[in-house]
Amino acid sequence: MKKTKYLLPVATAGVLALTLSACSGDGGGGGSTAGSSDCSAYDTYGKHDGKTVSVYSTIVDTEATNLEESWKQFEQCTGITIKYEGSKEFETQIGVRAQSGTAPDVAIFPQPGLLATQARAGYLKPAPKTVSDLVDKNWSPDWKKYGTVDGTYYGAPMLANVKGYVWYSPKTFKDKGWEVPKTWAQMMDLTKKIADDKTMKPWCAGFESGEATGWPGTDWIEDVVLRAQGPEVYDQWVNHQIPFNDPKIVKAFDQVGDILLNPAYVNGGFGDPRSILSTAFAQAGQPVLDGQCAMHHQASFQAANWPAGTNVAEDGDVWAFMTPPVDESKGTAITGGGETVGAYKDTPEVQAYLAFMASADFANNRVKLGGAISANKGLDPNNAQSALDKQSIQLLQDPKTVFRFDGSDLMPSAVGSNSFWKGIVSWINGSSSQQVTDSIEASWPKS
């Protein structure tokens, strides 16, 4: 792999280093309000009038609008114009662009494995020391590890999400006399009870996501591996210290299949199990509100997928409980995901942007706009715009929480964003758990 030693220009390094102590977000946690006229928190990034930084990511629609709003004041105060492009084809196109010499200045990677692929190919620039220091200050060592490739640090965490939530209607549960399950066995008992009642399907699901179709199914598998086998086996699986078709992993597929492949249990509001593949993930939870299904498995960002005006609260229209443990002796752990910000160029304006994105100022700005959380320790949970976001932030910041990053995002991109996703599609379409895991194992890069 081509490695380039990189040093900040002296003047820029001196200016950016002040962000560690001078930025209001990293000093006190509140952050500046996007759109205000006060530039005091941004002076330390320097002036870069007339400069442009191109940014490419998977984030689109409302989330993209909020992302751009969160750095608007940074643009106004530094003179940098951020040219943003979001695409659902990012996972495929970022490699194409890098190979053709048309890579963006900065990419926001949804999978550490994809960032690692780009870094090992020699396309990415190592992160400036200022960014590395900010990450040391604002995140746990595990989070920094996700942006480190072969001992070199490349990218800072951005936003985060807590995966493994099960969404439900509190009113429906109360009216039916259903209790929120505390174990996997209780959840399966509840699932059977709802199916036997025949008034609605127990579950609704949707795995359609363009070229990324299948990824919500990987979340299901990861949740069960972690909750049934514990973090040590989870880490062995993700790092290929045990094969993908290890009996423990095959068992996890079968346990998830007890729900997703059972026509009596899915797919409320949409059809039989195979309809999961044609149901867009962002719309898949709607039948919970319509009374056509009881539960929907999706990450914390599902809160942004509910229709405008939906009250997300314990006594509201919809709420969520964490997928319960399969084996209570394995302890409490959660899976989650997030983005990592990596750079293809190392100009002063790019360095300034990277430092801002690693700061608590950015985290607080974005979270204030709603529908987002971060594991940044400088983030004030009171800036969360919903009870669920606040709960998720506190969970991420709790030092007792055992956190594991989304497994498919950590695996080599040939697996995590390719054969694993395709394997889920094949599995829903009728292939056995053994066949699917054998196929994914065969696709694991040999070197």
Image (cartoon, rainbow, N blue to C red):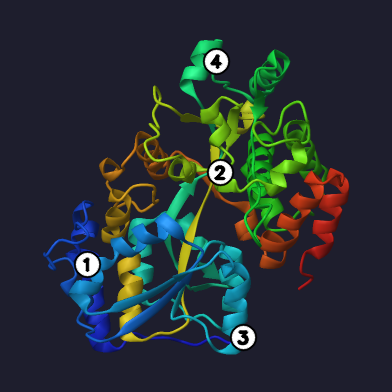
Asked whether the beta carbons under mark 3 and mark 1 sit within 8 Å of each other, the answer is no
Asked whether the beta carbons under mark 4 and mark 3 sit within 8 Å of each other, the answer is no
Chain-order first, disc 1 or disc 4: 1
Numbered label attached to residue 283: 2
Disc 1 to disc 4, C-alpha distance: 46 Å
Q: Within 10 angstroms of label 1, few (less than 14), some, or many (20 or more) residues?
A: many
SS of the residue at dot 4? loop
SS of the residue at dot 1? helix
Quadrant in which the C terminus is drawn: bottom right
Numbered label attached to residue 99: 3
Amino acid type assigned to the residue bearing label 4 in the image? Glu
Tell me where residue 93 appears, x and y as whole percent: 60, 75
Amino acid type assigned to the residue bearing label 1 in the image? Gln
Q: Is residue 238 in sight in this rendering?
A: yes
Which residue is label 1 attached to? 73
Amino acid type assigned to the residue bearing label 2 in the image? Gln
Chain-order first, disc 1 or disc 2: 1
Tell me where residue 132 appears, x and y as whole percent: 38, 69
SS of the residue at dot 2? helix
Query: Viewed as shown, does residue 67 lie left or right of 209?
Result: left
Residue drawn at the location 39% of the way across and 25% of the way down: 316
Asked whether the beta carbons under mark 1 and mark 2 sit within 8 Å of each other, the answer is no
Residue drawn at the location 64% of the way across and 39% of the way down: 205
Disc 2 to disc 4, C-alpha distance: 25 Å
Q: Within 10 angstroms of label 2, few (less than 14), some, or many (20 or more) residues?
A: some
Residue 166: image quadrant is: top right
Question: Looking at this view, is 416 or 197 the one in front?
Answer: 197
Image: 294 above or below 130: above
Asked whether the beta carbons under mark 1 and mark 4 sit within 8 Å of each other, the answer is no
Numbered label attached to residue 179: 4
